[in-house]
Image (tube, rainbow, N blue to C red):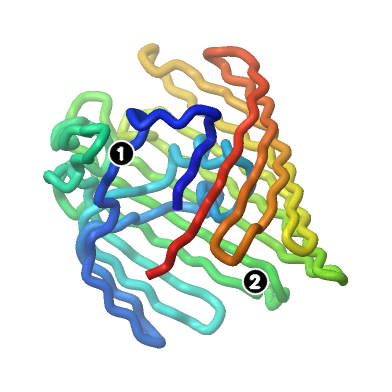
Amino acid sequence: VQTCALPILNIDDHALVIEELKLDFKNEDLHFYLGKFDAKFGNAHEKSKRMGVFTWQFNEDYNLRENIGGGLSALLENSIVSFSTFFNDTTDLSRSAIKGRERAERKSGIAGSNGTLSSYVVEMKGKKLFNIENLFYNFGYRNLGIDDAPNRKREQGYVFGFEYLHDLANQTKIVPLIEIVKIDNFGGAKDRNAFYYTLSTIASYSSWSLGLTYNKREINADEEMFGKISDDMLQINIGYKISENMTIDFTRAKISESDSGDANVFGANLSYLYRF
């Protein structure tokens, strides 16, 4: 997938990385994987949701990527229950080409970067919650290990998400979505707590879509070095599905950030998905 959210594409802002490299086994009941993978956390950061060009930039904060370890998922009738244990990639696989990202530091103090399989995620996602047709959900819990050091503590996080597909007549659909994330000791910093809220409604007709999305990010900390962050973003997005593999979206967003004030921005996103 190639994404461009700026009017000028600067090659220095892009990199070629090995994000996943794993052994993978799957049958009707189980899914097992071992190696480098994205542990992930929540759904609202996924670009495939098409909730505006800028939503993922807020919610990518709490996503978990480039982890080393293993995981197991039970594939049930209407749900998937998953468990994975891992640590953040600090091997040579964490380097990148083109931009030249250096190897991640083993002793960075970041939660999950302690080099042991002491971090884990438990997640359940599925559909037909309370036997309601087209009601999708995702619940998750994360616990990330940390090296012993002053003012550092294990990170714990919780995510709750719901999405409902309301299918109207004549190829028209409305999809409301909500996702709430709470993280204690965010990044491994003691008493640095974060909250993320995503509220979105997307209406689609044939190949067209129109969406309104609100994002809220709050990060509170006792330590003066972190301070308090309170950011809001409201987006309106118009999209068109060019083909089964290609979509284009245009977004107008009003962003209010506690450290830089207000801004009105415009973004465009052209995505092409190639399956192999």
**Rounded to the nearest whole Å, what is the CA distance between mark 2 and mark 1?**
40 Å
Q: Amino acid at mark 2?
A: Leu
Rendered position, 262 above or below 84: above
| Residue at the (55%, 71%) spot, across then down | 126
Which of the numbered marks, if any, corresponds to residue 129? 2
One can see residue 216 in this view: yes
Q: Where residue 227 appears, x then y in whole percent?
A: 45, 16
Q: Where residue 175 appears, x then y in whole percent?
A: 73, 58
Pointers 2 and 1 in contact (CB under 8 A)?
A: no
Pick whichever, 15 or 37, lies toward us: 15
Q: Which residue is denoted by mark 1 in the rendering?
A: 15
| Residue at the (69%, 41%) spot, across then down | 213
Pick whichever, 51 or 160, lies toward us: 51
At label 2, counting other C-alpha atoms closer than 10 Å, the crowd grade (few under 14, some 14-19, many 20 or more) is some
Which of the numbered marks, if any, corresponds to residue 101? none
The C terminus, quarter of image: bottom left
